[in-house]
Image (cartoon, rainbow, N blue to C red):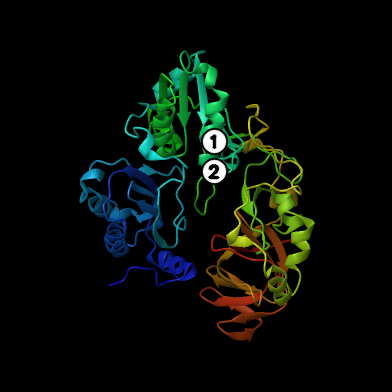
């Protein structure tokens, strides 16, 4: 009986591509009394693994919190696996605004103490006494009420790229930090103000609304289904969006564009930008905002120190990390003195640019590169710094100039000096060939390979 993943992310991505089927990225949650979370976890893994459903899921005695990627043709079968449990009958599934077949590449179901780390003692208040749920139209109407205070219960790196007009956006790293901060700031408004709250999919507000009612707030409201469901409703009903910018998401995409407004800045140069990236230094992996020009100049690094580090021999990089709390042990989200243009917390809703007319130019536009798509990335071998690609169109020869492009990798131009084709040295490669060659920077599964047609 299989209860854990047996395939790597790269192997799974290849199977997804070979299948050629559309996948849906979705999220859902439910608070319930689960007696045996481990048994529940194993049942879900068996059922979902059979449907090729992938994602990151937390289960606990208090319920389930899930972000997933499901084959579109298995959507109803997936829903049936949820309906098998009384507390998930009729559950709302928040389907992503933008789809990506590679949003999740593993099925990871973990048993936790809580499905959201809120730091609260649930025994001290009634968690079922929640705030009033509002649809998109109702939420917009209450936003217009001068007697309303709207609070973003997401983290600083989420609200920085997109939030509702006039929202309080606490400068916090996690949900549990925001609760006491907001409670302290709003002590004088418990009786006479409408407390309107929102988050990505609604789960954080489910607990927060009950907490604030317990704290004595009389008029507590929450956005039903969060930003994801709000976006679906405004598009379906033709309602103006009061949310501006991007909605940060916790999968490969790192964001869904809601409006063309760009309200954030590149953390390195200050130009209008709202694209997140992770530092290429394996000892850092800092999440920050970086424009295409800075990606190219800094090779996806957040600082000159990290840039210097990634050019050291791999063995030396590993030696430098020994004994340090690095990489996957420390989750720093855009908090670094090296980032000169990082702004967190309460900010104006001034729009710096429009996505369609942004001042920041894609490097490919800037230098008017003519190119043709010839393949995609399949793997990167960190220790040997070898990149693997599949040639899908046209061909490639030693001496060609190529462009490797992706949301995290940015735009990287290199000249091909030597290639392995299907495991052997060769001067040329054609459609269907698997090629490898040395690259000084990491490539990702979402990266595309282009051949430059002019210089």
**Which element type, helix, strand or loop, lies under badge 1?**
helix
The spot of residue 181 in percent (x, y) is 56, 32
The residue identified by callout 2 is 174
Q: Is residue 202 left or right of residue 386?
A: left
Report the Cα–Cα distance between label 2 and label 1: 7 Å
Depicted 285 relative to depicted 62: above or below: below
Q: Position of residue 326 (x, y in %)?
A: 64, 62
Can residue 100 be seen here? The reply is yes
Vertical relation: 147 (above or below) 150: above
State whether residue 232 appears in this view.
Answer: no
**Which of the numbered marks, if any, corresponds to residue 149?**
none
Determine whether, in the image, residue 16 is placed left or right of residue 40: right
Q: Quadrant of residue 445?
A: bottom right
Q: Give 25 or 168, whichever is nearer the viewer.
A: 168
Dot 2 and dot 1 residues touching (CB under 8 Å): yes
Residue 178 marker:
1
- Please tell me whether residue 451 is drawn above or below residue 78 in the rendered image: below
Residue 112, image x, y percentages: 40, 54
User: In the image, what residue occupies the spot 44% across and 21% down?
Assistant: 217
Left or right position of 92 against 338 = left
The extreme front residue here reads 124
Quadrant the C terminus occupies: bottom right
Along the line of sight, the residue nearer the viewer: 420 or 438: 438
Q: Residues within 10 Å of mark 2 (few under 14, many from 20)?
A: some
Q: Is residue 212 left or right of residue 349?
A: left
């Amino acid at each position: 009986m299989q209860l854990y993943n047996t395939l790597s992310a790269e192997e799974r991505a290849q199977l997804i591509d070979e299948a050629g089927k559309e996948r849906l990225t979705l999220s859902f949650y439910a608070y319930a009394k689960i007696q045996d979370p481990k048994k529940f976890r194993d049942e879900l893994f068996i059922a979902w693994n059979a449907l090729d459903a992938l994602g990151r899921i937390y289960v606990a005695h208090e319920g389930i919190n899930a972000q997933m990627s499901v084959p579109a043709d298995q959507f109803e079968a997936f829903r049936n696996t949820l309906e098998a449990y009384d507390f998930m009958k009729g559950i709302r599934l928040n389907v992503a605004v933008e789809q990506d077949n590679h949003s999740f590449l593993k099925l990871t179901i973990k048993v936790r103490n809580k499905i959201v780390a809120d730091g609260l003692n649930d025994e001290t208040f009634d968690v079922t006494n929640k705030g009033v749920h509002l649809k998109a139209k109702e939420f917009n109407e209450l936003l217009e009420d001068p007697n309303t205070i709207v609070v973003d219960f997401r983290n600083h790196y989420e609200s920085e790229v997109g939030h509702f007009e006039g929202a309080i956006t606490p400068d916090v790293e996690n949900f549990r930090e925001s609760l006491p901060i907001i409670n302290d700031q709003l002590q004088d408004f418990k009786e006479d103000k409408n407390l309107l709250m929102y988050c990505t999919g609604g789960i954080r507000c489910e607990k927060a609304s009950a907490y604030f009612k317990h704290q004595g707030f009389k008029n507590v409201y929450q956005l039903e289904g969060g930003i994801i469901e709000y976006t679906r409703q405004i598009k379906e009903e033709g309602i103006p969006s009061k949310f501006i910018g991007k909605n940060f998401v916790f999968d490969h995409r790192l964001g869904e564009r809601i409006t063309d407004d760009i309200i954030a800045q590149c953390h390195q140069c200050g130009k209008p930008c709202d694209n997140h990236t992770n530092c290429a230094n394996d000892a850092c992996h800092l999440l920050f905002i970086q424009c295409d020009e800075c990606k190219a100049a800094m090779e996806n690094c957040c600082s000159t120190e990290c840039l210097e580090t990634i050019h050291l021999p791999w063995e030396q990089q590993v030696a430098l990390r020994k004994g340090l709390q690095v990489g996957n042990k420390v989750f720093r989200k855009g908090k670094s003195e090296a980032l000169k243009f990082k702004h967190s917390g309460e900010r104006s809703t001034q729009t710096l640019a429009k996505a369609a007319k942004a001042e920041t130019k894609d490097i490919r536009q800037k230098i008017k590169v003519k190119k043709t798509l010839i393949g995609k990335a399949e793997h990167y071998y960190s220790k040997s710094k070898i990149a693997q690609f599949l040639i899908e169109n046209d061909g490639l020869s030693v001496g060609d100039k190529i462009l490797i492009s992706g949301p995290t990798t940015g735009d990287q131009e290199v000249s091909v000096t030597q290639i392995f084709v299907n495991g052997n040295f060769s001067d040329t490669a054609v459609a269907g060939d698997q090629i490898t060659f040395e690259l000084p920077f990491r490539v990702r599964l979402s990266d595309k390979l282009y051949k430059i047609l002019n210089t």
